[in-house]
Image: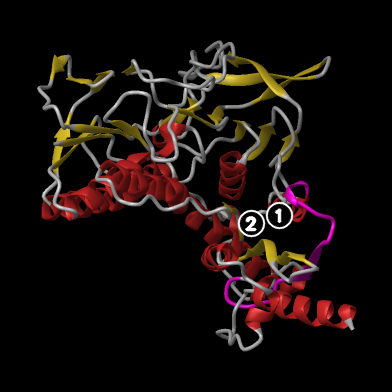
């Protein structure tokens, strides 16, 4: 028997692979629903919110150009209870699909809370019997980091796991965080009509490509981005205004260096990152961040116990967790474990998708790496932004000696799909000459293929 603890991306993909290999597998999932926080609280929820925000944004553009007449944009409002209701129905449908997949694969799904002590599994406090050759895969995922801020427990303070309790679009919203998720929330709620302030502990979108950061700032122009700023205290209303506001957040004290400022906020969203979920894991070696330590075959320090996904603290991305899950499954049954790719695509979703992979110049091993950049071509999803002179941007990094593509960045409506395939090709040592006979689909907002061809032309001229 192989027991998988956690039914998120890593656990579910591992279990499916193991079942397909003829192994007897069970998943123990605390919530009772497969899919993990990606489906329940993260990616899918953000997708629903972002779709609503982008449609409002696009409508505002059309109204500004007088293409669409009628109700003004100030009359367009998001009704959060209806949004959550419809989104919940979609999630329920996906839960059913995942349950059916597990059932067809012969995977037993058990609902309950697990405490693991070495190789001993306690389900809801009771020790489960296990055989000598039984294996365990820990795939408990991650949970939001909650900063230690006075007043953090006030009503009106949310994190990605509790956001669906928000019933009204805030008038003044404080977002604690400056990373990808924080930026996505800032875009969403600014389009919903909130006045948004971001308290970024360090730089906004730290370590992301410079051009991407400029694009992101362009898409959230009304958001107050406070870099190197801490939320020192959240304060409640006193309830004397005749409303039932006592106990709800009403303001926040922000600290930047020696300066302090109190700003109004009727809601706060915590988007300060993720931490490995290991609070119920005992007897397994952890690193300083609380992540489970594994070797290159997903093995922990306890024989027969493996770990994969966010709980290992490596890369907090759903596709990466899925790949780790499959790698762990192969290790468990003695198969060759695939190498995790060097180039991993990532994305920030605002009005455009901002996809990037290895655009950090500090990662270059030699000085011959060149960077080329062009505006992204206008096309579906960006044609009505031409008048704003903003259709996105395309950038690549190329080793001038070999012609190998070392990094990509694309800000456009469809960059996520393009970026994923480009990263795959980069892992196959994509060269600028490889696109000589490439034919694109037209019209398209993909500017990367143009840059690859341009890079080939330019480098060829320089070597003559």
Q: Is residue 426 left or right of residue 284?
A: right
Quadrant hosting residue 206: top right
- Towards the viewer: 423 or 386: 423
Q: Position of residue 451 (x, y in %)?
A: 73, 75
Q: Give the range drawn in magenta.
A: 362-381
Residue 96 percent across, percent down from the top left: 19, 51
Report if the CB atoms under discs 2 and 1 are less than 8 Å apart: yes
Dot 2: few (<14), some (14–19), or many (≥20) neighbours within 10 Å? many
Q: Which quadrant is the N terminus positioned in?
A: top left
Q: In this rendering, is residue 257 above or below 107?
A: above
Quarter of the image for the C terminus: give it. bottom right
- Eye-nearest disc, 2 or 1: 1
Whether residue 141 appears in magenta in the rendering, the answer is: no
Determine which residue is flagged by label 2: 356
Side of 327 relative to 232 (left or right): left
Q: Nearer the viewer, residue 433 or 26?
A: 433
Q: Count how many numbered circles sit on residues in the image.
A: 2
Identify the mark at residue 359; answer none if there is no mark.
1
Residue plotted at (12% across, 25% down): 130
For the question of whether residue 222 can be seen, the reply is yes
């Amino acid at each position: 028997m192989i027991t998988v603890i956690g039914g998120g991306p890593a656990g579910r993909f591992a279990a499916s692979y193991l079942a397909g290999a003829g192994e007897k597998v069970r998943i123990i999932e605390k919530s009772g629903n497969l899919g993990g926080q990606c489906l329940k609280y993260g990616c899918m929820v953000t997708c629903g919110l972002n779709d609503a925000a982008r449609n409002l944004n696009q409508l505002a553009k059309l109204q500004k150009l007088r293409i669409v007449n009628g109700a003004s944009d100030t009359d367009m409002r998001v009704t959060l209870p209806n949004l959550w209701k419809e989104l919940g129905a979609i999630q329920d449908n996906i839960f059913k699909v995942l349950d059916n997949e597990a059932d067809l694969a012969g995977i037993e799904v058990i609902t309950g809370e697990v405490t693991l002590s070495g190789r001993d599994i306690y389900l809801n406090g009771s020790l489960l019997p296990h055989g000598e050759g039984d294996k365990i895969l820990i795939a408990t995922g991650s949970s939001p980091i909650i900063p230690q801020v006075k007043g953090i427990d006030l009503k009106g303070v949310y994190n990605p796991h509790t956001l669906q309790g928000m019933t009204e679009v805030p008038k003044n919203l404080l977002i604690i965080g400056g990373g990808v998720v924080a930026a996505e929330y800032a875009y969403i709620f600014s389009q919903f009509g909130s006045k948004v302030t971001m308290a970024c502990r360090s730089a906004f979108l730290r370590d992301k490509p410079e051009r991407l950061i400029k694009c992101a700032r362009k898409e959230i122009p009304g958001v107050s981005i406070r870099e190197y700023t801490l939320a020192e205290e959240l304060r409640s209303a006193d309830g004397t205004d005749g409303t039932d506001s006592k106990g709800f957040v009403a303001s926040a004290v922000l600290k930047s260096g020696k300066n302090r400022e109190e700003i109004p906020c009727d809601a706060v969203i915590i988007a300060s990152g993720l931490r490995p979920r290991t609070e119920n894991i005992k007897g397994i070696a952890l690193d300083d961040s609380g992540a489970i330590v594994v070797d290159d075959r997903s093995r922990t320090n306890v024989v027969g116990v493996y770990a994969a996904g966010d709980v290992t603290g490596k890369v907090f991305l759903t596709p990466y967790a899925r790949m780790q899950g499959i790698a762990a499954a192969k290790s468990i049954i003695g198969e060759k474990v695939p190498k995790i790719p060097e180039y991993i695509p990532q994305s920030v979703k605002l009005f455009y998708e901002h996809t990037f992979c290895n655009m950090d110049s500090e990662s270059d091993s030699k000085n011959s790496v060149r960077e080329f950049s062009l505006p992204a071509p206008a096309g579906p999803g960006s044609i009505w932004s031409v008048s704003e002179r903003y259709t996105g941007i395309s950038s690549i990094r190329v080793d001038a000696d070999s012609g190998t593509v070392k990094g990509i960045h694309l800000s456009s409506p469809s960059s996520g799909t393009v970026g994923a395939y480009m990263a795959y090709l980069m892992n196959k040592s994509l060269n600028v000459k490889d696109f000589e006979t490439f034919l694109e689909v037209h019209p398209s907002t993909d500017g990367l293929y143009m840059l690859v061809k341009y890079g080939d032309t330019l480098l060829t001229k320089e070597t003559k």
